[in-house]
Image (cartoon, rainbow, N blue to C red):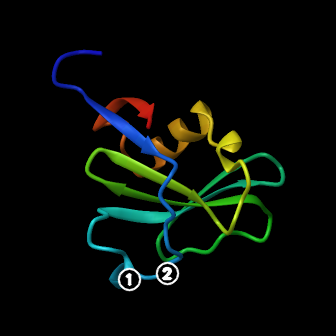
Amino acid sequence: MHAGEQVLLVDLERSLPDVDSYDSVPAEYERYGRCAILRNGAFWFGEVNSSHPPSTQEGFYWAVGGNVLYISPRGARYRFQEHVNEEFIRNLARKIGLKRRCRYFRIR
């Protein structure tokens, strides 16, 4: 890591609400949306006003607040963290545009 580069912290502990409009997004979050792993294994990404596709295998909510990326499962999911691997986090960070801001990440 180089001096001055920010580290993206990934928080898997916070439960995010299911909101569907920008007016409903809690003020502490800069960005908010949904993402999923589809039945065919593809990664799907959506903003706050989207819906998980019918072909969703595992659905998630995501939010950004400062240098923290929050990811929580849609509904109660036991051991959902198994699906949130390095490739998943890198795909999500790239779609949100965080790779320009934070080159490295760490799960807290």
**Figure quadrant of the N terminus:** top left
Q: Residue at x 41, y 31 (%)?
A: 105
- The residue under the point 50% across, 73% down is 17
The quarter of the picture where the C terminus appears is top left
Residue 4 image position (x, y, % from top left): 16, 24
Position of 89 with respect to 58 (left or right) is left
Residue 89 image offset from top left, x and y in percent: 53, 39
Q: Amino acid at mark 1?
A: Ser
Mark 1–mark 2 CB contact (< 8 Å): yes
Q: Secondary structure at mark 2?
A: loop
| Residue 86: quarter of image | top right
Question: Dot 1: within a 10 Å radius of its alpha carbon, few (fewer than 14), some, or many (20 or more) residues?
Answer: few
Tell me the residue at 49%/77% (across/down).
49
Q: What amino acid type is highlighted by mark number 2?
A: Asp
The local secondary structure at tag 1 comes to: helix
**How far from the left and from the top, in percent, is residue 77?**
72, 59
The answer to whether residue 90 is above or below residue 53 is above
Give the residue pinned by disc 2.
20
Q: Which residue is mark 1?
A: 24
Residue 36, above or below 12: below
**Vertical arrangement, residue 13 with respect to residue 100, above or below:** below
- Residue at point 36% right, 55% down? 64
Q: Residue furthest top?
A: 2
The 10 Å Cα crowd at callout 2, few under 14, some 14 to 19, many 20 or more, is some
Q: Nearer the viewer, residue 34 or 65?
A: 65
The numbered disc on residue 59 is: none
Image coordinates of residue 52 in percent, x first then y, are 66, 69
Task: Tell me how far mark 1 sits from mark 2, CA to CA.
Answer: 7 Å
**Front residue (pair 79, 90):** 79
